[in-house]
Image (tube, rainbow, N blue to C red):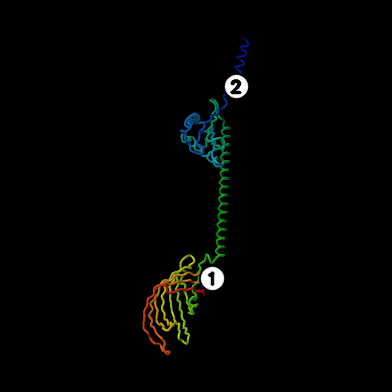
Amino acid sequence: MSRKITFLTLFLWLMTVTFPVIAQQKTDTTYTFRFVPQKDMFYVPWNGNDTELARLLECIENNKATILDGKLPLLVDGYCNSLGGEAENLATAKIRANRVKSELIIRAKIKEENFITRNHVTEGDFVTVRLTVPVKGTAVTDAEAEARRKAEAERLETEKRAEQERLAEEQRKAEEEARLAAEKAEAEKTAQQNKLTDTPSETKITNDYHFSLHANLLRWATLTPDLGAEWRICPSWSIAVNGSWTSLSWSDKERRYALWEVAPEVRYYMGEKKAWYLGAMFKAGQFNYKLSETGKQGDLMGGGITAGYQLRLNKSLDLDCNLGLGYLNVDFEKYEVIDDVRVRRGNETKDWYGPINAGVTLVWKLF
């Protein structure tokens, strides 16, 4: 009997000593909210999130006064590891945590300062909210609340500093990329300018002159001196005039070849190099041919369309190849020479449609 009394007394003493210690302990309650991998939207009805949210709101309501006083912060941890890089995972974890906090702020009427937030790039795709709820009859001391507020302030300062460093690094990279792009563009521009300098005949306008003299080499080859001039009004338009004259006789003047012609022309130059052209030409002149017993002497007049191309030889010389098609009217008389006297043998008039001019002309650009 004495042993039973002694054992009961010892048990009561242990309970007296141990119970206050147990009463001062705190219980941690964790609530987990699941997220779709690679997404940051908070779907409340999905994967049991609605049940967890209801439990958490009930716990907040039961401890709301303590939470609002700052003595019982909500510990929020955001997680993400389903994206490619650490920075992307950390940013998504932060967004997820903020979405959960926004839901609690709206539904439970609490404030941002009532949370302590941390974000992680490991473990999975979820957000946890943890409360260290004291057992009934105990309270969080002012020192503990102050320590928690200080820890939260330090955390926010660290996150702010990290965000500033990240932005500074992104700006530095952007400036470096812009500098490299500018250097590349400048190098390409310089190379293009060098190319233009090295190949002027391919890139500059071939006919960059204002006034030039012409000599039709085909006419000279037939012993018919031919000279002309061209005034370049602008890069696309010019006015030209050509003249030919010759007077030859042989076999004691029994044979004769004489003529003169004047051919004014308006030209329009085309293309990037202004080398091809189309023109409109008028031609007038007189002739005297006696290459057999019967000679022909008369007038010619007509005109047509010309086309040509100027090939650059050097800075001062071009070679102009051209052809004219159109109409000529020839009015002439036939004659014979008897005892050095011309005897008329009749008149004729002919119309000609076809080539009226051809030339391989040397162009000398004066200025």
Residue drawn at 37 percent across, 84 percent down: 345
Which quadrant does the N terminus fall into?
A: top right
Q: Nearer the viewer, residue 30 or 273?
A: 273
The residue beneath circle 1 is 313
Height in image: 141 above or below 7? below
Which residue shows up at 56% across the image and 56% down it? 184
- State the image coordinates of residue 237 (x, y, percent, origin top left): 45, 70
Q: Hey, which residue is sitting farthest front in the picture? A: 293
Q: Which residue is mark 2?
A: 18
Q: Amino acid at mark 1?
A: Leu
Up/down of 17 relative to 325, above or below: above
Q: Is residue 94 above or below residue 57?
A: below
User: Mark 1 falls on what kind of element?
Assistant: loop
- Quadrant hosting residue 340: bottom left
40 and 253: which one is in front?
253
Location of residue 46 in the rendering, given as x and y in whole percent from the top left corner: 47, 33
Q: Position of residue 360 (x, y in %)?
A: 49, 73
Which of the two discs, 1 and 2, labels the residue nearer the N terminus? Answer: 2
| Crowdedness near tag 1: few (<14), some (14–19) or many (≥20) residues, C-alpha within 10 Å | few
Find the distance from the CA under tag 1 to the CA under tag 2.
Answer: 114 Å
- Residue 214 visible, this angle: no
Name which residue type carries label 2: Thr
Residue 216: which numbered mark, if any? Answer: none
Residue extending farthest to the top is 1
Residue depicted at x 40% and y 79%: 300
Q: Nearer the viewer, mark 1 or mark 2?
A: 1
* Label 2 crowd (10 A; few <14 / some 14-19 / many >=20): few
